[in-house]
Image (spheres, rainbow, N blue to C red):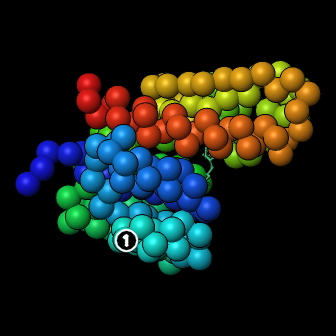
Amino acid sequence: MNNKPKIAVFASGNGSNFQAIADAIQTGELEAELLLVVTDRPKAFVVERAKKAGIASFAFIPTEYDSKQTYEKMLKEKLKSHGVEWIILAGYMRLIGPVLLEAFENRIINIHPSALPAFPGKDAIGQTMASGANTAGVTVHFVDAGMDTGKIIAQQTFSINGRNQEAVEKEIHAIEHRLYPSTLQQLFNR
Ligand code: GAR
């Protein structure tokens, strides 16, 4: 028995933030038990990453269910059966609905590639660049029913200083991979 927080990571794509979390658990920087990866895209690269890391993954296809409520009920059962206590969103590109919000109240966390409340929603980095802003950032926040509107836990910003989108994306990901594990560790310890 151990009393480490039991987490599931939800991801829809590459999974580099999943990797950063899994690696931080390996090194002991993040004290948590990573029980499950959940994806809404069965072909997402995160599935390969999970396999390689020896973490169970569960893929579902949202359109095979008649509503968000139906698939979230299914996910809730799945998560509860694994003993999951926290849901960590890492590039999961869907809004969380009332079923999971109620079942995991104040225990769903997201990372977003902008300095919220600026540029919520999809393509936050593209939105940042198109706006002409000189500041980009990363935010870790609690998830509520809105689109990237939950209480902010940690945020890091930097100056763009004429860099192109590719360079800004690189910097954002580098920040994310440090900020997410360290913020989760602080959160779990408070
Ligand atoms: C990350 O940059 C994350 O902040 C962003 O998706 C990317 C996933 O990358 N999330 C959102 O935009 C959520 N609104 P990853 O799959 O390599 O971790």
- Whether residue 30 is visible here, answered yes or no, is yes
User: How many other residues sit within 10 Å of disc 1, few (<14), some (14-19) or many (≥20)?
Assistant: few
* Residue reaching furthest to the front: 27
- Give percent across and percent down for residue 136: 73, 28
SS at mark 1? loop
Residue found at x 55% / y 43%: 177
| Circle 1: residue type | Gly
Of residues 47 and 142, the one nearer the viewer is 47
Give left or right: position of 60 versus 3.
right
Q: Which quadrant is home to the N terminus?
A: bottom left
Q: How many marks?
A: 1
Residue found at x 28% / y 47%: 32
- Give percent across and percent down for residue 12: 57, 61
Residue found at x 73% / y 43%: 170
Residue found at x 28% / y 67%: 78
- Whether residue 103 is visible here, answered yes or no, is no
Vertical placement of residue 140 versus 20, above or below: above
- The answer to which quarter of the image holds residue 142 is top left
* Residue reaching furthest to the left: 1
Of residues 38 and 164, the one nearer the viewer is 164
- The answer to which quarter of the image holds residue 43 is bottom right
Give left or right: position of 46 versus 29.
right
- Give percent across and percent down for residue 90: 52, 50
Label 1 C-beta lies within 8 Å of the nearest ligand 1 atom: no
Of residues 30 and 91, the one nearer the viewer is 30
Q: Which residue is mark 1?
A: 54
- Give percent across and percent down for residue 117: 63, 25
Of residues 88 and 178, the one nearer the viewer is 178
Give left or right: position of 134 versus 40.
right
- The answer to which quarter of the image holds residue 169 is top right
